[in-house]
Amino acid sequence: MSEHLRPIATVDIVLFTLAEPADDDGLQVLIAERAQEPFRGRPALPGGYVHVDEDADTAGTARRVLAGKLGVQAPYLEQLYSFGSRTRDPRGWSISIAYFAMLPAGRITTLPAGARWQPVATLPVLAFDHAEIVARALARVRDKATYSSLPAFLLDESFTLPQLYAVYCRVLGSRPDPASFRRKIEAQGFIVPVPGAFSQDRSSRPAQLYRLAGPELRAFDRTI
């Protein structure tokens, strides 16, 4: 009996952050030029092979890639979809278990050689089917932003309500009514005030600082 050929198995990660300065509206993703064939010199998502002797699961692979290649632990990581075919990789049958992650701006102080943050609105031609992976991840993020705490994972550990509102606006690409947004957010109970902590922005009055009530994603009982 002949052995079955094994497909190439990788994990690819759409790592989202917000552009700086804050008046830049776009979500950004991390891409890096490939140093080897196939698609040498073409930008691609960060990723790596599944190490069957090291990774307990594909989430473990994703965390290892983020830590090893970028030196970060993302506060939020979610499996997106599995992409597999005999044509997505010129080397043969391949499967990509895609994840997306949320990272506050500035967490990566030094990018690896050839890597850069790229606005999702102006992505170049990407290697493999990574453009499709980004598009699916972006749709997932924008959908979940309407009914969950997902955008808050793009913020630092403490934040003001105006900062939270601004992040939701930037992720959604729209501006919910501010008063209605505040009422809905406060009713969900996923943020709590930091006792005695206020913003130090000298351009405006000090504002109460908040933090997430817990590390898990919270689904809302109504849309934003």
Image (cartoon, helix red, strand yellow):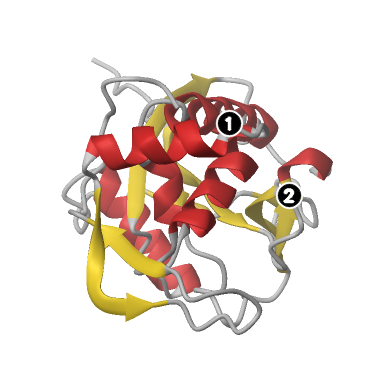
x and y percentages locating residue 199 in the rendered image? 45, 77
179 or 7: which is nearer to us?
Answer: 179
Disc 1 on helix, strand or loop?
loop
| Residue at 65% from the left image edge and 30% from the top image edge | 129
Q: Say which label, 1 or 2, has the lower sequence index.
A: 2
User: Looking at the figure, which quarter contains the N terminus?
Assistant: top left
Residue 2, image quadrant:
top left
x and y percentages locating residue 79 in the rendered image? 35, 35
Residue 121, image quadrant:
top right
| Residue at 49% from the left image edge and 27% from the top image edge | 140
Q: Which residue is mark 1?
A: 176
| Residue at 64% from the left image edge and 34% from the top image edge | 175
58 or 8: which is nearer to us?
Answer: 58
Q: Which residue is mark 2?
A: 25
Q: Is residue 68 left or right of residue 116?
A: left
Pointer 1 and pointer 2: residues touching (CB < 8 Å)? Answer: no
Residue 176, image quadrant:
top right
